[in-house]
Image (tube, rainbow, N blue to C red):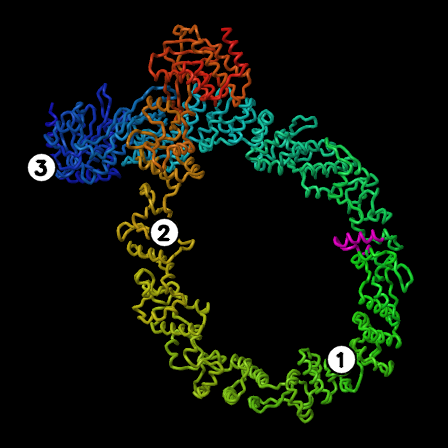
């Protein structure tokens, strides 16, 4: 048999012809091998998977634990100059000769066709992939020492597969030195000197090797990676050791078996070893014919293995693969379990071939395997509580996969799971219940809370699943499992279920008031959306107090249908009061009140707002205030006389006891029914009268005049005392109340009716007269007296008077009250009427105290009223019949009497002057306006109708009363009284060719009116309406006439019109003095109006196109002549002339002068881009002669100068379609025009702006419209460069363009530096040079640029000076002080200087610092990608969270963080599921679990503490985001089984349970806070007296267990020393250990704890306090004095009954 070296030589010689003739196929084979190796894998380092696959396929000797070890070193043991070398050690049987020959070939794997034997490799090229990382791989195995080379062999021109024997470099000694001398070298060693550019990638792959790589390998049980260097500080590879172990096989069925596999890792960076258990389900399925493929023809069964991680997967912080083909692929399925099968893989091993039919067949079987596996996990766990099974449902594929084929698997699993009895239901017995999803319903969390509270209070819930649905287990029915339950299709129960549940249970009456309100609140919140149309409305839910005082239940429907009314008070202090008074009215109110306890509980209920709103609006519970209750009672009286009176008593006492305010009482009193004097109940009233008995109104009125007006006369029942609701109302109290609040009134405080006072029509007694005046006095300041009432008093003859010394009675309105002297004067014979005076002798001086009241009813006091009285008397005579001549002279004589007595006559005159009693030429007239005729009035009488006093009637005697007539208003004498002439002007005064004197008189009247600023329109109209003015062409209307003037007569010669002129011979020269009056009448007297008349003719001519060349020139000549005079053409004349279109232009149409230009050479440049209206000066029209009238044309508005016509340029602008044809001069000329326009204050129109909005200005960025251009000036140079934005091309236009900055600015070009931000910002996308972008940013920042809402906010992130990318601002942050977000966000402080930070933050809305959401996302990334954190990373993260902690932060972290940091004891900090980590609030438990478990389960916190992250604050944060406390999570269980043979009864149990102990306990229980009576205290300690105490040598232990989210249980045992079996009344204690303070304190602590727990089983919150006391007393050996001091110091005492109990108990013992 050949040696290994001889075998290699043979291969070289025979196969590769080394030493013979060169094989021509060698070069082709070399290239094929090279191409296949390079293209095989997408990544450089998949060689590692090939090596692991090869190791798995290798054969191993019996008794060997198959292992694969990888070591990387910087030592160059191969002498190839490699900076690093990778060594692979495998303890397989070693390379055989066939293996050697295979590796020297392509496609000749020894594993082909051996799938059934467990081989997982299939590509013979696999080993060749190592050439991607090494140029010379070495193999040392079973005596073989060979290497391969990627460079072609010089003998064969073939690389990769030519073996070369190795004698040294390395030697076996070199290899062993690297491996370590502690153990023998494994059989096979592969050495790979790495290529320099591949070292980093190889190290990264080695550092991130998946710990789950061994999960589905049947052979390899140990895998390790490490780095070996002389200087350990140079090590960069994270060393790891991975091992797997199968603990046990649990069952076999349906060609399946299940077992638990444990993976553990030991990394150099970890203090403790990491471990994860996996529940493995392996099931076989026959291969279907339609799924067979050539590469698997020999395989008859698919073996599918599903792995369910029972803890945190060992993924080293990386994404965990979800699909294995024995080794991991890179497919992340998003499923919480792993699928393993003999998949056909892609050549790169990154994925399985999803479209391959073999793989599809496997995937079709996965759902069945999953359902079987899940059933075995859930339903077959007999002794496990349902609550511990719930986390297993996390294995359901709730989340979708990114692979459609895998989503089909997910949907199939969902469908199959929904057909299984797999959903755990709530059971209040030991029997577990599992049902299908559609048979199970969920409850809302709030209802679960109600049920749990009800169960604690004894409410039976055994029929919970008897209402049409099984109810989901409460441990499962949480928000945490919403996604799982949605996946399974478990829905909420319908609304009817809740109604059935409540009706069938005692929830309403069986729980405390607070819990009852929680139930109502639950129903209230869902009433509108769920319950209002269900049977819930018929469930007896509402409590009320029945007629007998018992609590009764009522359904909601009784209230909503109006069958029952339930009320409650909105304030607690009114509850009892309402109930008491409701009893008085119970026979009519038909209302009931909620129990007082319920109402008070509602007042303290935290969610009372929602509850009250529901009760009021939906249930129709009447939430009544004290006022509302009073209104309810008022509305319930229903005409009951007794209740109506009782209600007044109710209001009186409600007010006096402050249940109702004055305002409320007043409001109620306005509507209460009252009992009148007939005993009738009156509900409507206008007012209230006091009872007639003893009233003043009866004395004055005799009868009740208010009855018809709706007034209620109160009955005498209100005057009597009564007793209601236990309170007494005295006689006077109720009437006082009624007067104050019901306004029960009497004279003089009552309002009188609007009827006549019958007593006023007869003389009143003096007493009643003064009572009436007192009444009027009272009313005068309060209201207006009713009309009828006041009239009857004014006109009634009840007031006693004296008339010329004779007594009598008169109405007040015809009576006077004067002093005696004034009265005597009124008796003079010249006074025409007798005056009635009030009889002061009858009424006495007291009557003078009522002057104001007498005035109110019409009594007169002043002398002027006497005159009025006389005057009215005279006028009454004039009304009844015409005054005689004698009467008139009596009036005149009376006026003369008053004037001579120096008495005022104004009132008398005022009364008679407007009466029509004076006879005139136009009949009876009033004195005012009448005229006393004389000769001065003769001329006026011709044109006016003036009423002259009739001289024929009165005679010349009337002329003797001129003074009196003037006082009466008669006009005496003409005195230029032109206004009177005007007022009485005849309607046709000018109708019959009036004389000259008549016309001149009218003109004089007009002048008089104008002087006195009065209207003379009447006179003007008298003239205008008739042909009344004589002219040289006969009588004409004034508007047709002219006054001649030779200065402007020439204007009329342009057209041959005639103009009528006023006849001066007829009127005389005086008519010229009335020039203004003629003008007012319409005569044309001024040039301006004459010119207007002419311009009208001119305009008509122009509009009719009857203007010829001769008319134009004639008019211009006339215009020149008049312009040389002082006359000025009126503006409307110029308007008509200038606006009329009578000048012909070159455009072919006539234009008005102001629309024309007289051409000149300076217009030539701008004409190329405009259309302008030049006057046609060609020979065919006006010719050059038109230029002679240059001045006149200019005056008429024609544009002569260039600067005056630029406005036409603005209107006539017309750019060519091709902007490149526009010459620079054209643009500059246009800018000059704009310059002139702006200088003259011209505003550029919208039409002009629209015309120039085209792209016609040349910029460095091409032709642009003005609003898209910038003008680069000197101010820009310090900030930007010319090519930083769209600046105008100054090389094209020349420097002269800068002279037009204002003009360019007006047309939209941006000139100011501060205004260019938007254009510069919009141009940013054209830049990629970092320095330019920084320059632009600085400019935008300095100029305060702010983007519009639709502007994308992006930031340039440079990659070198000319490369980079635009990134959205939301993906950027300015500062990252802890350097945590480099991979998450673009940190701007790394690229930009601080000067721009404010710009980024304020303008581009870049966050200054990462937000809470950013930190949360970062943590999630760490959860997925990092196995451990550094202390600085964790400290920085939690310090930030602590600083920004609030409710929002709490919710964010609770919802998103699934892992928290745990103590690791190493430099790194591990992350673990927050459900498997605990807060160490019990250090003893922490010590026990840390000692017993290699895994850390306690949260991390910095040590020592740092100021920014206090330990207590951090632990509180952990607690609020879902981390449990160890003390609340641990389950304690006694595990020691004590055999009777081991026990020794303690005969003197008093040494253990002594009197001192019991005394201390009784004293503690007697504390008031315990609320225990003597009997209860003594009953609590009787258990101690009845104990049998045993001692044992054996250890007494207790087990502490923690349930993990995976379903695993962590447990630890601890010495308990003693135990109290309460049910058996036995106390077991381990024999004391001798000596030592530790043993003593431990024994005392445990003893105190056990005793306290036994005594206070029902009051657990006090256990610690009692335990501490007992421990101290124990350490003091229960010394009586010491214990006594201890009790006093804690304020504890033993009462006499307890002392007697102790004495009795121990005396009996």
Q: Residue 1279: x and y, percent?
A: 31, 60
Magenta part, dominant SS: helix
Side of 862 relative to 1686 (left or right):
right
Give the residue number, with chain letter if any, for mark 1. Answer: 984
The residue most toward the right is: 806
Q: Which residues are magenta?
A: 769-789
Q: CA distance from mark 1 to mark 2?
A: 89 Å
The residue most toward the bottom is: 1065
| Image depth: mark 3 or mark 1 in front | 1
Q: Mark 3 near mark 2, Cβ–Cβ under 8 Å?
A: no
Residue 187 is inside the magenta segment? no
Label 1 crowd bin: few (<14), some (14–19), many (20+), radius 10 Å:
some
The front one of 796 and 632 is 796
Would you identify the image quadrant in which residue 1261 lies?
bottom left
Would you identify the image quadrant in which residue 1211 lies?
bottom left
Indicate the quadrant containing the N terminus: top left, top right, bottom left or bottom right: top left
Label 3 crowd bin: few (<14), some (14–19), many (20+), radius 10 Å:
few
The front one of 1688 and 581 is 1688
Mark 1 or mark 2: which comes first in sequence?
1
The front one of 249 and 99 is 249
On residue 1398, which mark appears? 2
Side of 665 relative to 476 (left or right):
right
Give the residue number, with chain letter if any, for mark 3. Answer: 21
Q: Residue 950: x and y, percent?
A: 84, 81
Residue 782 is inside the magenta segment? yes
Would you identify the image quadrant in which residue 848 lies?
bottom right
Q: Is residue 767 above or below residue 675?
A: below
């Amino acid at each position: 048999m050949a040696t290994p070296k001889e075998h290699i030589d043979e291969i070289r010689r025979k196969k590769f012809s080394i030493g013979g003739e060169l094989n021509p196929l060698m070069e082709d084979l070399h290239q094929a091998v090279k191409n296949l190796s390079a293209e095989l894998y997408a990544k450089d380092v998949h060689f590692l998977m090939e090596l692991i696959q090869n190791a798995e396929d290798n054969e191993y000797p019996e008794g060997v634990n198959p292992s694969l070890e990888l070591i990387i070193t910087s030592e160059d043991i191969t002498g190839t100059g490699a900076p690093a070398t990778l060594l692979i050690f495998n303890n397989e049987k070693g390379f055989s000769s066939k293996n050697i020959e295979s590796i020297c070939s392509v496609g000749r794997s020894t594993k082909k066709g051996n799938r059934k034997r467990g081989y997982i490799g299939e590509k013979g090229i696999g080993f060749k992939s190592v050439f991607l990382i090494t140029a010379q791989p070495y193999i040392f195995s079973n005596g073989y020492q060979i290497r391969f080379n990627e460079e072609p062999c010089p003998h064969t021109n073939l690389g990769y597969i030519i073996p070369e024997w190795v004698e040294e470099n390395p030697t076996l000694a070199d290899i062993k030195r690297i491996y370590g001398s502690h153990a023998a070298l494994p059989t096979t060693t592969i050495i790979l000197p790495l290529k320099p550019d591949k070292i980093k990638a190889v190290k990264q792959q080695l550092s991130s090797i998946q710990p789950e790589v061994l999960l589905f390998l049947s052979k390899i049980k140990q895998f390790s990676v490490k780095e070996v260097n002389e200087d350990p500080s140079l090590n960069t590879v994270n060393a790891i050791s991975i091992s797997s172990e199968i603990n046990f096989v649990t069952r076999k069925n349906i060609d399946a078996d299940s077992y638990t596999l444990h993976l553990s890792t030991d990394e150099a960076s970890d203090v403790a070893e990491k471990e994860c258990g996996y529940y493995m389900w392996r099931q076989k399925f026959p291969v279907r014919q339609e799924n067979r493929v050539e590469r698997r023809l020999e395989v008859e069964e698919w073996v599918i293995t599903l792995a369910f991680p029972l803890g945190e997967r060992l993924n080293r912080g990386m994404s965990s693969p979800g699909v294995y083909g024995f080794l991991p692929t890179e497919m992340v399925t998003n499923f919480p379990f792993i699928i393993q099968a003999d998949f056909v893989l892609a050549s790169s091993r990154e994925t399985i071939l999803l479209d391959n039919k073999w793989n599809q067949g496997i995937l079709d079987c996965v759902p069945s395997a999953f359902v079987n596996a899940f059933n075995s996990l859930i339903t077959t766990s007999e002794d496990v509580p349902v609550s511990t099974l719930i986390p297993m449902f996390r294995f359901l594929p709730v989340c979708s996969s990114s692979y459609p084929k895998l989503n089909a698997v997910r949907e199939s699993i969902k469908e199959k799971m929904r057909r299984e009895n797999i959903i755990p239901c709530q059971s209040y017995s030991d029997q577990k219940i599992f049902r299908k999803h559609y048979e199970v319903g969920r409850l809302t969390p709030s209802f679960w809370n109600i049920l749990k509270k009800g169960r604690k209070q004894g409410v039976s819930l055994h029929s919970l699943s008897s209402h049409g649905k099984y109810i989901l287990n409460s441990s499962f029915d949480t928000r945490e499992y919403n996604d799982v339950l949605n996946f399974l299709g478990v829905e909420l129960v319908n609304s009817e279920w809740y109604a059935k549940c409540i009706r069938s249970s005692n929830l309403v009456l069986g729980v405390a008031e607070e819990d009852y309100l929680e139930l109502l609140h639950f129903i209230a919140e869902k009433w509108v959306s769920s319950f209002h149309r269900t049977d819930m409305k018929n469930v007896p839910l509402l409590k009320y107090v029945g007629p007998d005082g018992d609590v009764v239940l009522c359904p909601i429907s009784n209230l909503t249908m109006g069958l029952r009314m339930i009320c409650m008070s909105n304030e607690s202090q009114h509850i009892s009061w309402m109930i008491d008074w409701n009893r008085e009215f119970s026979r009519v109110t038909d209302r009931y009140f909620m129990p007082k306890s319920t109402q008070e509980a509602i007042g303290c209920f935290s969610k009372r707002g929602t509850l009250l709103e529901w009760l009021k609006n939906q249930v129709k519970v009447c939430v009544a205030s004290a006022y509302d209750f009073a209104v309810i009672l008022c509305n319930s009286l229903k005409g009951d006389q007794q209740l109506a009176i009782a209600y007044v008593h109710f209001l009186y006492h409600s007010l006096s006891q402050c249940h109702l305010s004055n305002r409320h009482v007043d409001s109620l009193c306005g509507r209460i029914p009252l009992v009148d004097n007939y005993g009738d109940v009156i509900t409507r009233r206008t007012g209230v009268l006091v009872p007639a008995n003893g009233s003043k109104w009866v004395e004055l009125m005799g009868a009740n005049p208010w009855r018809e007006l709706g007034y209620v006369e109160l009955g005498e029942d209100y005057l009597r005392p009564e007793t209601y609701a236990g309170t007494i109302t005295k006689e006077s109290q109720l009437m006082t109340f009624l007067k104050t609040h019901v306004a029960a009134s009497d004279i003089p405080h009552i309002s009188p009716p609007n009827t006549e006072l019958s007593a006023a029509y007869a003389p009143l007694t003096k007493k009643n007269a003064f009572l009436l005046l007192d009444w009027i006095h009272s009313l005068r300041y309060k209201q207006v007296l009713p009309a009828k009432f006041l009239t009857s008093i004014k006109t009634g003859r009840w007031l006693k008077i004296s008339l010329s010394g004779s007594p009598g009675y008169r109405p007040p309105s015809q009576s006077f009250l004067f002093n005696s002297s004034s009265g005597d004067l009124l008796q003079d014979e010249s006074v025409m009427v007798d005056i009635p005076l009030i009889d002061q002798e009858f009424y006495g001086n007291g009557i003078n105290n009522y002057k104001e009241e007498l005035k109110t009813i019409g009594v007169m006091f002043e002398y002027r009223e006497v005159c009025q009285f006389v005057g009215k008397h005279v006028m009454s005579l004039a009304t009844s019949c015409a005054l005689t001549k004698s009467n008139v002279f009596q009036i005149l004589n009376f006026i003369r009497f008053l004037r001579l007595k120096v008495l005022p006559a104004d009132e008398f005159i005022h009364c008679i002057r407007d009466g029509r009693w004076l006879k005139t030429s136009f009949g009876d007239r009033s004195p005012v306006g009448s005229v006393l005729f004389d000769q001065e009035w003769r001329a006026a009488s011709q044109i006016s109708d003036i009423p002259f006093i009739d001289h024929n009637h009165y005679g010349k005697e009337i002329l003797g009363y001129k003074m009196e007539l003037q006082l009466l208003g008669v006009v005496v004498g003409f005195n230029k009284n032109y206004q009177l002439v005007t007022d009485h002007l005849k309607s046709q005064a000018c109708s019959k060719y009036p004389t000259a004197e008549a016309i001149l008189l009218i003109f004089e009247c007009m002048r008089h009116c104008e002087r006195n600023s009065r209207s003379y329109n009447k006179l003007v109209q008298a003239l205008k309406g008739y042909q009344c003015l004589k002219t040289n062409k006969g009588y004409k209307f004034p508007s047709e006439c002219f006054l001649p003037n030779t200065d402007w007569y020439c204007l009329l010669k342009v057209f041959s019109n005639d103009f009528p002129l006023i006849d001066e011979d007829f009127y005389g020269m005086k008519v010229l003095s009335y020039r203004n009056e003629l003008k007012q009448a319409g005569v044309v007297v001024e040039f301006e109006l004459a010119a207007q008349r002419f311009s009208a003719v001119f305009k008509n001519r122009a509009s009719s196109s009857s203007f010829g060349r001769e008319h134009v020139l004639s008019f211009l000549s006339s215009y020149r002549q008049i312009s040389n005079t002082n006359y000025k053409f009126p503006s409307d004349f110029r308007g008509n002339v200038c606006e009329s279109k009578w000048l012909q232009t070159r455009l072919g149409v006539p234009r008005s002068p102001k629309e024309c230009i007289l051409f000149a050479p300076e217009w030539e440049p701008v004409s190329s881009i405009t259309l302008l209206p030049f006057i046609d000066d060609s020979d065919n029209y006006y010719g050059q002669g038109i230029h002679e009238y240059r001045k006149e044309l200019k005056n008429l508005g024609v544009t002569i100068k260039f600067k005056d016509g630029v406005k036409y340029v603005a209107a006539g602008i017309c750019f060519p379609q091709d902007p490149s044809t526009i010459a620079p001069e054209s643009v500059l000329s246009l800018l000059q025009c704009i310059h002139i326009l702006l200088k003259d204050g011209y505003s550029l129109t919208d039409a002009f702006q629209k015309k120039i909005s085209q792209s016609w200005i040349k910029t460095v960025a091409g032709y642009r419209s003005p609003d898209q251009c910038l003008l680069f000036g000197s101010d820009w140079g310090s900030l930007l460069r010319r090519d930083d934005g769209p600046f105008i091309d100054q090389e094209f236009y020349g420097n002269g363009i800068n002279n037009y900055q204002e003009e360019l600015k007006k047309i939209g070009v941006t000139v100011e530096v501060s205004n260019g931000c938007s254009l510069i910002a919009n141009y940013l996308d054209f830049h990629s040079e970092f320095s330019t972008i920084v320059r632009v940013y600085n400019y935008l920042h300095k100029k305060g640029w702010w983007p519009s809402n639709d502007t994308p906010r992006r930031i340039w992130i440079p990659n070198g000076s000319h490369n980079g990318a635009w990134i959205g601002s939301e993906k950027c942050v300015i500062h990252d002080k802890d350097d945590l977000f480099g991979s998450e966000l673009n940190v701007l402080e790394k690229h930009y200087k601080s000067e721009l930070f404010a710009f980024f933050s304020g303008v581009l809305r870049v966050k200054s610092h990462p937000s809470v959401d950013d930190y949360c996302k970062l943590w999630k990334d760490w959860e997925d990608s990092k196995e451990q954190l550094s202390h600085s990373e964790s400290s920085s993260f939690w310090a930030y969270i602590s600083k920004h902690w609030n409710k929002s932060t709490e919710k964010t972290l609770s919802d998103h963080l699934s892992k928290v940091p745990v103590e690791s004891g190493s430099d790194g900090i591990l992350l673990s599921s927050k459900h498997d980590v605990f807060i160490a609030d019990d250090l003893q438990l922490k010590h026990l679990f840390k000692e017993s478990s290699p895994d850390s389960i306690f949260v991390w916190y910095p040590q020592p503490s740092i100021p920014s992250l206090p330990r207590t604050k951090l632990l509180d944060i952990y607690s609020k985001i879902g981390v449990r406390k160890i003390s609340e999570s641990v389950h304690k269980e006694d595990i020691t089984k004590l055999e009777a043979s081991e026990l020794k009864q303690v005969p003197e149990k008093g040494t253990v349970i002594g009197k001192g102990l019991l005394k201390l306990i009784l004293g503690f229980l007697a504390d008031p806070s315990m609320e225990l009576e003597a009997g209860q205290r003594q009953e609590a300690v009787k258990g101690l007296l009845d104990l049998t105490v045993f001692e044992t040598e054996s250890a007494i232990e207790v087990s502490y267990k923690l349930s993990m989210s995976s379903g695993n249980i962590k447990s630890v045992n601890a010495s308990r020393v003693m135990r109290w079996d309460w049910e058996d009344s036995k106390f077991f204690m381990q024999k004391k250990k001798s000596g030592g303070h530790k043993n003593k304190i431990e024994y005392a602590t445990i003893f105190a704890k056990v005793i306290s727990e036994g005594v206070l089983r029902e009051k657990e919150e006090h256990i610690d306090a009692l335990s501490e006391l007992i421990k101290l007393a124990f350490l003091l050996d229960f010394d009586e004095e010491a214990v006594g001091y201890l009790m006093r110091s804690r304020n504890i005492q033993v009462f006499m009954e307890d002392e007697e109990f102790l004495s009795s108990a121990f005396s009996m013992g």
